[in-house]
Amino acid sequence: MVSDSSRRKVLIVSALGSSLAPFMVSAFIVGLPSIGREFSAGTAMLGWVTSAFFLAAAVFLVPIGRLADRSGIKRIFTAGVGIYAVSAILVIISPTVEALIIARFVTGISASMVFGTSIALISLVFPESERGKAIGINVTAMAVGFLLGFFSGGFLTFYLGWRSIVAVLIPLEVFIVWLILSRLRGECEISRQREIDPKGMILYVIAMFCLMSGFAILPSPAGGALLGTGLVCLTVFIWHEGRIKKPLLAVRQLARNRLFVVANLTALLYNTANFAIIFLMSLYLQSVRGIDARVSGVILLIPIIFMAGLSAYAGRLADRIEPRIVIGCGVAATTVSLFLLTSLEQNTPMHLVVLALVLMGSSIALFQSPLVRTLVSSVPREVYGLASGMVETMRLAGMTISVSVTVIIFTLAGAGTPSAAAGSPADIGSLHTIFWILLVISLGALGATYALRKSREEVATTQ
């Protein structure tokens, strides 16, 4: 039995750790135009500054989640926070945009160690009747990280330069490690299986890296080659996992768990549809409307405020009613937001822009914690780390694809810089094209939400 005091400590540590990456992501979004000006980098390279983080996190989440199940969830979480600090130093000393991209990749690895264990840590110590609320609080902490990133990122970039974005986090990262080591006793080893399936890990990492990076550089021939390589490696990985007794990912067993499969698919589609909105709105506000980084950061606080304000409530609501109803409302809100943005122009009334951002932030709150609660509840506790890693993989993979769609459309339109990408009438048309593509994906997520209901009904009839 875990005491209430221990639960609170775990929740505090998890919330603080989970807020680090969102802060850096949102602050970097605000700082992208400044980074582009300093390094004379175009939209494609700036897209990689964001995508490198999500690529690394998506590639390593599942192996790290499975490793945490076997070697200690708290241990992996703590190491992840420590590597955050190392990656922050690498970002600060980056002399070129290429070096910055590599540093962001290291940050993504550390994020995978935190994201892949934070939900598992909470799920282990909180009973199912309180789990939605706890996950909601954790999501709120992530939202606060986003909020502070947008708010302070603009001011830090304007007054101290974009490198100060990560410098201010180093003391907090050191404090979190101290808090874990001095206040949280014991370890969380929830799997009796000690084998780590190194071949499976290598195949999975190569497959995910090739698939994600290949998609990111489409429509180039190298992108197609990487996608083909990734599909071959993924096929070999699935074949390998079906042949061994102690696999990294029990593919056949998980494939029979329809609720687990559909929940992951829903997470992938939703995050693909949703994430690029913030990236595009940052470029739109600064490059089209001519608003500076400080004011843009404040405007981009709007969705995060609603996300932070509603996340804990959405988690509690999912403890009381059918979670898929809350999830469906979240997907619907993103769909309406994207529909409004398909007609975005230079002189679009600001109240319509604000309404779209409000819907987006509310959508994330309604979607995230109920979906995570549903997915984790669909598997036994000995694979909580794996389940946590899978849902975060789908979330980050969706974010990577979302940014990649943006880069591909701008590249096909011949837009090389953020100002060019959003400044001319022809390239404002590219913004419209991207929003329409994301709208179609969001409609697909709505369909997956309906399938999620059917899956829950099937699970209920078999229990």
Image (cartoon, rainbow, N blue to C red):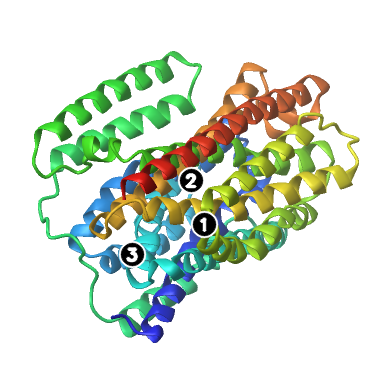
Distance between mark 1 and mark 2 Cα atoms: 32 Å
Of marks 2 and 3, which one's residue comes earlier in the chain? Answer: 3
The kind of residue on which mark 2 rests is Leu
Viewed as shown, does residue 312 lie left or right of 237?
A: right
The percent coordinates of residue 215 (x first, y second) are 45, 25
Distance between mark 1 and mark 3 Cα atoms: 20 Å
Of marks 1 and 2, which one's residue comes earlier in the chain? Answer: 2
Residue under pointer 3: 77
Which residue is at 51% across, 55% downward?
A: 370
Pick whichever, 420 or 69, lies toward us. 69
Which residue is at 27% across, 81% downward?
A: 185
Which residue is at 39% across, 75% downward?
A: 10
Categorize mark 2 by other alpha carbons within 10 Å: few (<14), some (14-19), many (20+): many
The kind of residue on which mark 1 rests is Ser
Residue under pointer 2: 100
Quarter of the image for residue 187 reads bottom left
Closer to us: mark 1 or mark 3?
1
- Compared with 196, 400 (above or below) is above
